[in-house]
Amino acid sequence: MVKQGRFAKSSKLKQIKQIRRRLHHQPGRVIGPEQFQNFVLVRYDLTLKKKYRHSDKETMQRFLIELLGVAGAGPTWPMATLVTKTFSQIGIRVPYQFYRQVLKNWESFNHFLEREIPAVPLKERISLIDLASTADVEQIILRQLAANTLLSTGNPQLIKLMRPAQLDSLVANLSSDQAIDWQKVKAVFEPIGFDTTTAPDSATQQWLNELKEL
């Protein structure tokens, strides 16, 4: 059974309400890079989060935290590259349903990024380049899921030994007509299982258990 490993603690998420009271946008105000992540999380809390339902709220918030950690404060965000790196960093720390939720919500999430990231009042504003469409993200997720089948064996070194053709074969086993076939994904990952007991706190464990039931 795949162990959950460390993921964003709920204590980080609880800080948002406190930060929200301190970070009030004022005309002409400039924030420092050290305030960037919290500023974006507050904007998510005030806008997009309200439009999501149930566990989607927390899934997309936790994905945003991971993405911000990979991307930093700019000055340019090559989106396709950053999304690929973020999923690679997440790997098997979440069940496969996490990836399905992110893909389902990508269009609205991407609009949030395109609107909010360049608007963050940094001294040097951030530009988004190499934008990732929903179709692009589906292919990124498909390849990550293929890599996860190897990570789940407990021997991550296998990925380094894989030839491109072998990875393509794993991708084909999880797809139909070049799109993710979630029934095939389920058939691969469900027998492996996913251990939520190593979650860093009870809120994270509850969220992961909710994902497993989707």
Image (cartoon, rainbow, N blue to C red):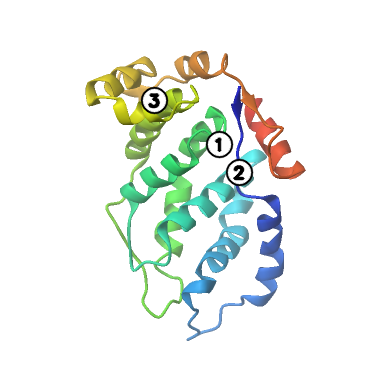
Q: Position of residue 14 (x, y in %)?
A: 71, 58
Q: Is 29 placed above or below 54 here? A: below
| For the residues bearing labels 2 and 1, Cβ distance under 8 angstroms | yes
- Which quarter of the figure is the N terminus placed in? top right
- Type of the residue with mark 1: Arg
Q: Residue 179: where, in percent of width, then height?
A: 35, 24
Q: Dot 1: within a 10 Å radius of its alpha carbon, few (fewer than 14), some, or many (20 or more) residues?
A: many
Q: Quadrant of the C terminus?
A: top right
On screen, residue 20 above or below 141: below
Left or right of 68, for residue 131: left
Can residue 214 be seen from the camera position used here?
no
Q: Crowding at label 2, few (<14), some or many (≥20) Cα neighbours within 10 Å? A: some
* 58 horizontally vs 87: left or right: right
Name the disc covering residue 189, or none: none
Residue under label 2, please give it: 6
Badge 2 element: loop
Looking at numbered disc 3 in the image, what kind of residue is underneath it?
Ala
The image's mark for residue 146 is: 3
* Label 2 to label 3: alpha-carbon separation: 21 Å
Q: Residue at x 62, y 46 (%)?
A: 57
Element assignment for label 1:
loop
How packed is label 3: few (under 14 Cα within 10 Å), some, or many (20 or more)? Answer: many
Which image quadrant for residue 48? bottom right
